[in-house]
Image (cartoon, helix red, strand yellow):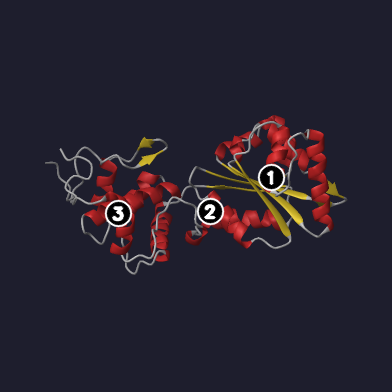
């Protein structure tokens, strides 16, 4: 039986990423797992999600809600938004906020570059936050708080955020909230005890997984951004990537990156179905904490991989 990467030429794997970039004639690694707005792929679903983000900001929506599976590209959209936001907006980005309402205020103030005294209680912190919003409003500045990974917020915290949006000046909203998270966030917001919160959600969108055709376009796009002059993944390989990754961008990146490593070790300038199948068969591709998409017990017809 062949073992992991069996039959591939011996090499220093620590140098693989740099070497395969040059080997394929690329200027940078095309399938990094780190969110990079420079590689943003505008699928119809991501375009709609971003349109909802813009709509929420332009219409001064009290709460905008964006959800999607892990690795759907939500954080990349946020980074693009932060790079293009108008100068009259003060942004506070909070990731993985936790704790009681007093600690929530500390997270918020810290995100807005405001010092929160260690000895300050909830009333003092809330007064400081309210004064900050009023001061920014007086200077013609809007304040937007963005909560990433918002599915981790408790129901009590979400209700506290709703109370924040009650701070206003006549008809003008002093604060807007953007909540971005996994699908369970939408489920939490729809709970009966958060009906008032849900009523303040003026813009929302759920990013669904990419279709197989979108996956093929996504792979091609990222390779072109990285400097590819010729197609590297053939149609069958792209289809298999779409199937194994379930159309989730982060998983697409992981499987494509591994497939390029395997193709490089074979001195091949293209990634074909048999290369992707070998990555899956070796169990080096993980999704949701489990190896997925494993190849069938016997190689598919036409595959060059055989057992020895």
Residue at horizontal 40%, vertical 56%? 213
The CA span between labels 1 and 2 is: 22 Å
Which residue, given by chain and number where applicable, does mark 3 sit on?
A: 16
CB within 8 Å, label 1 to label 3: no
The CA span between labels 1 and 3 is: 40 Å
Which residue, given by chain and number where applicable, does mark 2 sit on?
A: 76
Q: Nearer the viewer, mark 1 or mark 2?
A: 1
Q: Quadrant of residue 285?
A: top left
Of the 4 image quadrants, the one containing the N terminus is top left
Secondary element type, mark 3: helix
Residue at horizontal 56%, vertical 58%? 47
Q: Quadrant of residue 102?
A: top right
CB within 8 Å, label 1 to label 2: no
Of the 4 image quadrants, the one containing the C terminus is top left
- Tell which circle, 3 or 2, labels the residue nearer the N-terminal end: 3
Q: Which of the two residues, 173 or 12, is positioned nearer the viewer here?
A: 12
Q: Residue furthest right?
A: 170
Which residue, given by chain and number where applicable, does mark 1 sit on?
A: 110
- Tell which circle, 1 or 2, labels the residue nearer the N-terminal end: 2
Is residue 165 in sight in this rendering? yes
């Amino acid at each position: 039986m062949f073992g992991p990467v069996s039959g591939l030429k011996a090499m220093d794997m620590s140098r693989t990423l740099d070497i395969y970039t040059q080997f394929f004639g690329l200027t940078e690694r095309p399938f990094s797992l780190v969110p990079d707005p420079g590689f943003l792929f505008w699928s119809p679903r991501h375009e709609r999600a971003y349109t909802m983000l813009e709509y929420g900001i332009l219409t001064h929506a009290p709460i905008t809600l964006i959800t999607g599976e892990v690795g759907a590209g939500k954080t990349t959209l946020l980074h693009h938004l932060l790079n293009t936001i108008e100068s009259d907006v003060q942004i506070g980005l909070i990731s993985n906020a936790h704790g009681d309402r007093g600690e929530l205020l500390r997270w918020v103030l810290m995100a807005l570059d405001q010092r929160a005294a260690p000895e300050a209680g909830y009333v003092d912190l809330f007064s400081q936050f309210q004064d900050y919003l009023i001061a920014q409003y007086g200077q013609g500045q809007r304040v937007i708080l963005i909560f990433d990974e918002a599915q981790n917020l408790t129901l009590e915290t979400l209700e506290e955020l709703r109370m924040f949006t009650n701070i206003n000046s006549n008809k003008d909203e002093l604060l807007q909230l953007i909540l971005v998270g996994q699908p369970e966030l939408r489920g939490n917001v729809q709970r009966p005890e958060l009906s008032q919160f849900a009523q303040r959600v003026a813009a929302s969108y759920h990013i669904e997984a990419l279709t197989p055709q979108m996956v093929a376009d996504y792979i091609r796009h990222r390779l072109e951004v990285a400097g590819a002059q010729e197609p590297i993944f053939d149609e069958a390989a792209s289809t298999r990537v779409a199937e194994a990754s379930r159309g989730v961008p982060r998983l697409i990146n992981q499987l494509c990156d591994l497939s390029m490593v395997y193709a490089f070790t074979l001195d091949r300038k293209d990634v074909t179905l048999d290369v992707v199948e070998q990555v899956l068969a070796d169990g080096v591709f993980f999704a949701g904490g489990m190896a997925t998409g494993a190849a069938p017990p016997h190689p598919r017809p036409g595959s060059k991989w055989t057992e020895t």
